[in-house]
Amino acid sequence: MSYFCLSITFLDAEYHGRCDGDGPEWPPSPLRLFQALLAAAAARRQEPPLVTQASLKWLESQSPPLIVTPQHHVGVPTRIAVPNNDWDTLALAWARGQEPRKQPAELKTMKTVRPIRLLDGETVVYLWVLPDPLPDCIREHIETLSRIARSLVALGWGIDLIAAHGRILSAQETDRIPGQRWQPITDAGIPTLRVPVQGTLEALINRHKAFLGRLRDDRFTPVPPLTAFRIVSYRRVTDPPSRRWAAFRLWHPTEDRHAFFPQIRANHVAAMLRNATARLAEQQHMPPDWIDRYVHGHRRGGDDSSPRFSYLPLPSLEPRSGKSTVVSAIRRVLVAELMDTVESHRPWVRQMLPGNFLTDDKTGDRKALLTPLGIGDCVLEQYTEKAATWATVTPVVLPGSDEGKFAKAEKLFFKALRHAGYAPEALAELEFRNVSFWPGGDLALRFCRPDYLKENFWSVYHVRLRWKHPVQGPIALGAGRHCGLGVFARIEGATRMD
């Protein structure tokens, strides 16, 4: 595999570009780079127009690039006076032979400047995947775009001066590029960046023509905004994506109160929730194959990454005496989907599951009624809000036995992280123990587990971890993460692990 690499080096290690809503844009969007390339091509006038347009059309048709950036932080805002956009009225008055109401020096407005400051480098790299083998026509496009890139002057505001360089890199060379890697994702997220699409080049050319003709016949015609682009969510490779979920309160089937279950029976609650979802799907004549895979989670060929539901009981986390948060019984449950699931079935679950019962499979007794649970519930927020430090409420089952060795336990835990879609590099600290990190929590080995998680003496631990960047919940890790085990809650206000 090879990549077309465009590297942009900022001469002053600052970037002032803004996104929609006038917030700081980072990384610089692929559409902004595309527009800069078009401007550089127009300024050069050294390439035949048809050749330049063909290369830019090839670039706009490519998938969103991977972006590599240095570390950054948002600078301190400052206020400066800058020329406003009212100079067209000046030009119009002069064209009519009239005296303008204001002089050019008076046409100023106050503007807040808050640049992005680059901390450990000045170069931003854009990487587009190339086909293998590489056709000669694409190689010619890359040579043309690389020549145009050498004429780039700025990216962002006019003061964001740059030097640019284009080339083809192998996968090994790409892996050695230092910095934070930002990849496009299918799920909605932050930040969102504008990306060119087929038709962007033509729309920009037409918009430029409209700009040149905005003053005509003593009339001003506003230039319409550019619409030929799409919005793509980007996230750092080390930042786990968020999960889609639907939460429910457990209500007593005959009395006007909560239903509750002991925390160590989280696995049984998850099984009842899964069976209730399967019964509902069968009643609505959903496809049997979908019920088998997505609802029951039956795997084919050992594949543990295909889309499915996870069933997560949420033991209550209650403040006591204003000092500590205590774990108590299970009164809420949550159905979550895997990360980056392209087709979501959360709306179906959220709409159809309320009003159904959790039923004991052995006796047939109704144990709890599912009722909707919305945003704002303080316990639910402990499991779903963003935080850097998290600890298990139900223990993690490692995918193997650690034989009492921390190094092996750590290796198995990193394997479990990858299975759940997280990067081990995103962790800052990690701690294992048998005793719960929450007052009122039970020992890890006392939690019920399905038989298939007991056969090979797989290790079970309570885990506390701290991420390098805050992570959005819900988080469930380990071999039992789909059936109520390995569920984490955020530790509010935690800055380090003692």
Image (cartoon, rainbow, N blue to C red):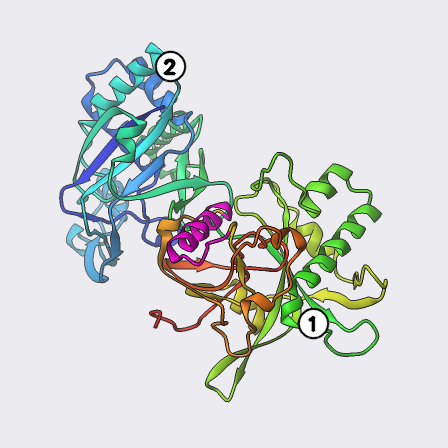
Q: Nearer the viewer, mark 1 or mark 2?
A: 1
Q: Quadrant of residue 90?
A: top left
Quadrant where the N terminus sits is top left
Looking at the image, residue 49 lies above or below residue 426: above
Q: Is residue 256 left or right of residue 66?
A: right
At 56% from the left edge and 54% from the top edge, which residue is drawn? 457
Seen in the picture, residue 279 relative to 37 is either above or below; the reply is: below
Mark found first going from the N terminus, 1 or 2: 2
Q: Secondary structure at mark 2?
A: loop
Disc 1 marks a residue whose amino acid type is: Phe
- Residue 450 location (% of width, % of height): 66, 56
Front in this rendered view, residue 488 or 382? 488
Q: Give the structural element (helix, strand or loop) at label 1.
A: loop
Q: Which residue is mark 1?
A: 261
The one nearer the camera, 453 or 440, is: 453
Quarter of the image for the C terminus: give it.
bottom left
Q: Inspect the image, locate mark 2, and give the three-letter code of the amino acid beneath it.
A: Pro
Viewer-nearest residue: 324 or 75:
324
Magenta stretch, main secondary structure class: helix
Residue that carries the numbered disc 2 in the rendered image: 133
Residue 91 visible in this rendered orientation of the protein: yes
- In the image, which residues are magenta? 401-420
In the rendered image, residue 11, in percent from the top left (x then y), is placed at 13, 42
In the image, taking residue 251 as reference, residue 475 lies left or right, namely left
At x 84%, y 75%, the residue is: 254
